[in-house]
Amino acid sequence: MPINDLLTTNRPETLAEVRSLLRQVHREQFTYFPSPANWADEVLYFLLPDRFSDGRESSRPGLSRQQIAQFRAASTRPDWNWKAWADSGRVWQGGTISGVRSKLGYLQDLGISSIWIGPVFKQRVRVDSYHGYGIQDFLEVDGRFGTRADLLALVQAAHDRRIRIILDVIVNHSGDNWGYVAPGDSPAAAHNEPRYRHWPDYYGNPQGAETAGWSTVWRSEHQRGESDAALLQGPHDMVWPRDLRSFSSYTRAGMGDLDDNKNIANPHAQHKRTDFFALKDFALDDPSTLAALIDCYKYWIALTDCDGFRIDTVKHMALEETRHFCGAIREFADLLGKRNFLLVGEIAGGDFNQDYVVDNLAILRRNLSGALDIGSARTTLHGVAKGLQRAKNHFDQFSESSAGFESHRHFGDRHVSILDDHDHVTGSKVRFSSETPDESPVKDYQIAAATAFQLFTLGIPCLYYGTEQAFAGPAQNQLQFVRAEGWNDGSNHGDRYLREAMFGPMHPRGKYNLDITAQTSTLDTSLPGFGPFGTAGAHTFDSTSPAYVRIAALCSARKAHAVLRVGRQYQRQIKLPSTGFVYPEAGELVGWSRILDTQEALIVVNPNAGAARGGDVVVSGELFSPGDEFLVVANTAEIAVGAGHYQGSHPTGSTVKVCGRTTPEEPVYVEIREVSPAETIVLLAAA
Ligand SMILES: [Ca+2]
């Protein structure tokens, strides 16, 4: 029976309707798409639906690298208003779910096998939460992104290509669906972020000396507080489903410190109970609230056949609540034949928090699958790939012999490797390529070298949209025009510079305070679109760009050889012209091996942006002897110029001989020579 049969004309209004639908799923034989055996076999791609594609790129020109370079070289652009462009970055741009579907071929050719799509659920209709993290209707797709049918069609089209879809879900909080009213104030003046109240107090608490006189009121479509909920009957009023309309489902503690990380284990800690600015914290310690949210998200699995969830703001949920949510979702997915449904947590606040949650919830595979590496692992990766940090800093994270279990990074499918994302909760609010100097000859593809670390070291690699086009925001000589507009400043909407609209709209959507029809059928012509590199009206879906072709070649090698995905991992010592065999300093050649059974893959990256590098790279002395050969299976420098035109060292298909052991102490090694800046070579041998 096709899943489309579950697609009712109207979305359910209550969880009773959802439960009836879930009973139907139990009763009838729907066919669901199975999970991968191991998510480390996948290559993830994270995109924000508002900022990726509107499916209409053929109506706009593509931006060539030459044009991008010209734009970036110009210190002034008389016809261009940087402030208007920056302002545009704060509002809805017009990307859609159907737009994502139109780009499946582009993503498949890049080597992507799973897409993590930012939240698609219905937002407050007159609020600028284009990022999707402020839900008003937990059972509906946002009209600006499309329909439930569009989402189902995306998943089906993706599955036809063996691409999986991961939805981004929020359990910790709802949108700005209600407000706080101080004693004596009008409900219409309902506001957000009153001073935090410590557990067990809350606003409206009859026992609270300072909070008893307060009330909370639902918001209308127009964000006004309304004390008589009977007047709020529209689809854009209050919250949906109806089951979430009891204020006891919300913590109501006001705005506290999101980063009081001292007590990650305390379920009543401030960071667990605080609102997320205007977004309202759910009282997940109320069992019926957590059960309601579990049913909402079971609905989306049943309806769409999605393959996993990325769970937002896990740090702000108590461990038991996360455990309960993940366990319930995993059982439901198991029932549908999705025996390895991905549940990956966003755990902010640094590595300690991340490791604490993973150690507690991921070890036995029954709760969380793993975590996003958004702490120091991400910034270390930036530094190593740019040649600014020793590669050992990256590889030591996987060491089994260092303290603890290093949170199971060495298990390889517990961590999702992140180079860039939409938040950069740790580190600067600018993309990897933004920090590569504009005059650098590797500006357009240094990020491919960073991606090689993601693709070929332990973990599940996740590319952020725009990585393959080396998105870099405005040029250094243009930053003067956007610094005042929050460039790199998280508290001033600096996140927007991590979220350019890849499809290059001419203008953003009609203003967000208009009704939904006007928002979806008109454009705000007073602003330019928030296109990449400080442009509007030109897209960047270029499958010939320097980063795209390199990453595609690396993904192709990864797909072809299991050893590159699941092999054991060893950083290799290298003998440089001036050293013995050492773990080289920052900016020197980096080599590491993956070993599976009797096969060894050797990956060599030159993170030096300015000069070629070579060295003698150690390989396994247990598997290989002098005279054996390694075969080159990928060379990014060669891909860039085309196979017939490559004049450099180690072309694909060539071999290098194993040398060494001229004394009993000497290791066996291969001689790698003249690797160009920011290029990667992958070699393979079987004993
Ligand atoms: Ca919370």
Image: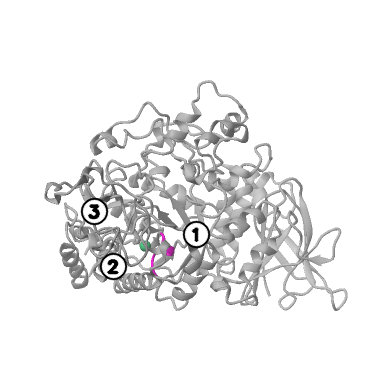
Q: Quadrant of residue 7?
A: bottom left
- Report if residue 665 is visible in the image: yes
Q: What amino acid is found at the position of numbered circle 2 in the picture? A: Leu
Say what secondary structure mark 1 lies in: loop
- Is residue 467 inside the magenta stretch? no
Q: What amino acid is found at the position of numbered circle 3 in the picture? A: Thr
Spatial CA distance of label 1 from label 3 is: 45 Å
Say what secondary structure mark 3 lies in: strand
Q: Earlier along the polypeptide chain: callout 1 or callout 3? A: 1
Residue beneath label 2, please?
290
Residue drawn 33% across the image and 51% down it:
134
Which contiguous range is marked in magenta? Answer: 313-318
Residue 281 x/y as whole percent: 33, 59
Residue beneath label 1, please?
43
Residue beneath label 3, please?
216
Residue 448 x/y as whole percent: 60, 50
Report the front residue among 62 and 183.
183
